[in-house]
Image (cartoon, rainbow, N blue to C red):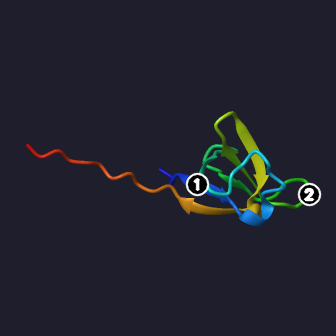
């Protein structure tokens, strides 16, 4: 199973994406099954698709930093 990815807007690109916050990590959504970053669009730019609170946004990958989604630690209750 592929690792879930997250993306965060680089601060220098905030004017290009006014609906996105450079402080938040967004879930990267699949473009095609198993593909999170498309090699290039018709203009030769690598693109990715992120999920926002409202919908999805297709963005230039170079305007974002990426990381693997952190594994949420399970709290084990001891009796």
| Quadrant, the C terminus | top left
Residue topped by disc 2: 43
Q: Residue furthest top?
A: 54
User: Alpha-carbon distance for marks 2 and 1?
Assistant: 24 Å
Report the front residue among 30 and 11.
11
Q: Position of residue 49 (x, y in %)?
A: 71, 47
Query: Which residue is situated farthest in the right direction here?
Result: 43
Q: Position of residue 45 (x, y in %)?
A: 84, 60
Extreme residue toward the left, this view: 79
The residue located at (65%, 51%) in the rendering is 35
Q: Assess disc 1: are there few (<14), some (14-19) or many (≥20) residues with their C-alpha within 10 Å of its C-alpha.
A: many
Q: Secondary structure at mark 2?
A: loop
Which structural element holds mark 1?
A: strand
Res 33 quadrant in image: top right
Q: Is residue 57 left or right of residue 79?
A: right
From the viewer's side, name the closer residue of 47 and 27. 27
Whether residue 37 sits left or right of residue 68 in the image: it is right
Question: Does residue 77 appear left or right of residue 54 in this picture?
Answer: left
Identify which residue is drawn at 73% across, 64% down.
11
Q: Judge by depth and name the residue closer to the eye, 1 or 20.
A: 20
> Looking at the picture, how far across and down is residue 77, in whole percent?
17, 44
Would you name the residue on which mark 1 appears?
A: 6
Total count of labels: 2
Q: Is residue 53 above or below residue 41?
A: above
Where residue 56 sits in the image (x, y, percent)? Answer: 71, 39
């Amino acid at each position: 199973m592929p690792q879930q990815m997250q993306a965060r807007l680089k601060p220098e690109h905030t004017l290009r994406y006014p609906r996105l916050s450079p402080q938040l990590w967004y879930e990267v959504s699949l473009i095609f099954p198993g593909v999170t970053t498309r090699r290039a669009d018709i203009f030769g730019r690598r693109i990715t698709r992120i999920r926002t609170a409202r919908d999805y946004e297709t963005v230039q990958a170079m305007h974002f930093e990426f990381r693997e989604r952190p594994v949420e630690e399970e709290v084990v209750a001891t009796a």
